[in-house]
Each structure stands twice: as structure tokens, then as C-alpha cells.
Image: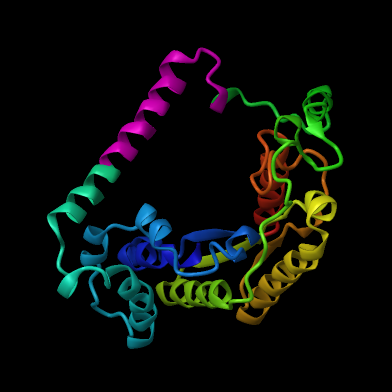
Amino acid sequence: MSYTWIPILLKYRDILNGVSILYYSNSVYWTKKLNIFHDEYYKRYIGISLLNSISRDNISKQIWDIHSKYTDQYTSHLVGNTIYPKQFISDYSDMFFALVNENYKFFLRRYINDENKENNYQMVLGTDKELEILNQFDKKLNIKKAWSGRFQEGLGDISNSEFQYESLRDLIKVAKFIGADFRIIVAPYNKLLSEERSPDITDKYEKIQKTVLSIAEDEGIPYIDGTDLNEVPGIFKDQMHLSDYIGHEYIYKKISEHYAKD
């Protein structure tokens, strides 16, 4: 959701100046359920306390209008844009439990897990381990066999709304304004699952990828083209999420090769 990142970029614009930001563009956000301003998604990442802490100093009217276009939709349910105690408590409780959760997982990885996977990770692509992992996948649907009974309708249908394209362009404008080194990775979609169970909408997913690539070129934004991964065996674990090991490693290779060219 590109619009959810706009307040964060503006809040930390001094820190993010010159920093490389790689935005992962996933076609799932163009589905009918998500190709709108999604209040719950926005709340997941952005709190009222963060919005109220953004200084307008040295922010042009054009950029502030972009910011307001989304924040106004979020705050419209608050009378007079005041912070109700319930909302305030909700913001901070969400933040607190997120911090506790992340630190708890970090503690377990660092002090409980003797293998310390982060430091001893071994790539599986091109090894016998890759073949072992691929045996867990339904080759026709390109998802894990454990999920093959689900997603009978294939991929989610695509909305004709321009909302996600417009919000992506808005994010790019904000990133340019703060001087960030903004880049896009056009993520793969599960083409095999779509062709098998939702063939009528496969072309729609293709169009999204091509349009995002076109936007990147029009805006002069460096990009990583992940469309050649659409049919790679084992890259997805379900409809849209990358699989552990294989999916993540292919994306890692794309990113590392991209930055190695700089």
C-alpha cells in the first residue's frame, strides 16, 4: 500500500534524504478489496500520534495536499480531527505490543536458538536442498501442497480503479521531494495458479506489472523487473506470498544484482 508510507517519509524526511528506499510493488493491492483507501491497512501502519507529529515546515503545498488527501480520509471519522482517548490508547497499545513481539522474537533467535539462523543461513538455490523443498509444492498450481485445496477461485479479481496507480505516483512525488533514492521492485504474481483456476484475469495481472514498469520509466525511477519470476517453480507458498527459501532467495538475488550494478 504505497499511500501508507507517505506520512513516514514526511515525518523522517531529514533522515531519509539520500537514503535508498526500495518499494515492493505487489499486484495483490489492485484487487477489488484493496484497490481503495483501506482504513484498516492505514491504521495498521500509521497512528494519529504520528500524523500529528509531522511538521509542515518547508513542505510545499503540492506535497502537503498529497499527504492530506489520504490523512483526511483516515481522520474524517474523528469529530473536528480531535484525538479521542480510545484512539490514542489504541495507537500506543499497538505500538507497544509490536515492539514487545519483535524484541521477543529477536531474543529467541539470538539467545535460545543455538543455530542462530540469521548468521548461518545457507542459500538453497542450486543445491540438493532446493530439490527437497520443491517436493513440497504442487507443480501445477505453484503453491505448497498443503495449500492446494484452497484458492479454488485462483487469484483475486482486479478492480478497474486507478487508485493504486495514483497513490504510487503520489509516493514517488513525496520520495523525490525529500531527496530519497527511491526505487521500485515489480513483484511477481502466481501466474500458474491464475492460468489454472482464474484464467480470465491473468491478463489483468500482466497489465498491472507492465503499467507499474511504465510508471517507473516515466518518472525516471530505477526499478527491478521481477516479472520473469511469475512462473518460477516454488517461488510462492500460496496465492501471493513468497515462499521461504526459494521465493525469498530469488528476490534477494534480484535486489543484490541490481545494487551491484550501481
**Is 33 above or below relative to 133?**
below
Main secondary structure found in the magenta portion: helix
Is 132 placed left or right of 109 in the picture? Answer: right
Write the residue at 50% across / 70% down.
36
Farthest residue toward the bottom? 61
Write the residue at 23% across / 78% down.
57
- One can see residue 72 in this view: yes
Q: Nearer the viewer, residue 77 or 144?
A: 77
Is 9 placed left or right of 170 in the picture? Answer: left
The percent position of residue 201, horizontal first and vertical second, equals: 76, 64
Image quarter of the C terminus: bottom right
The percent position of residue 246, horizontal first and vertical second, equals: 73, 36
Write the residue at 38% across / 52% down.
44
**Is 4 above or below relative to 216?**
above
Is 139 placed left or right of 100 in the picture? Answer: right
The percent position of residue 163, horizontal first and vertical second, equals: 53, 75
Q: Nearer the viewer, residue 107 or 146?
A: 146
In the rendered structure, which segment of residues is drawn in magenta?
Answer: 96-118
Q: Is residue 109 magenta?
A: yes
Kindly indicate the quadrant of the structure image that contains residue 79. bottom left
Write the residue at 79% across / 62% down.
202
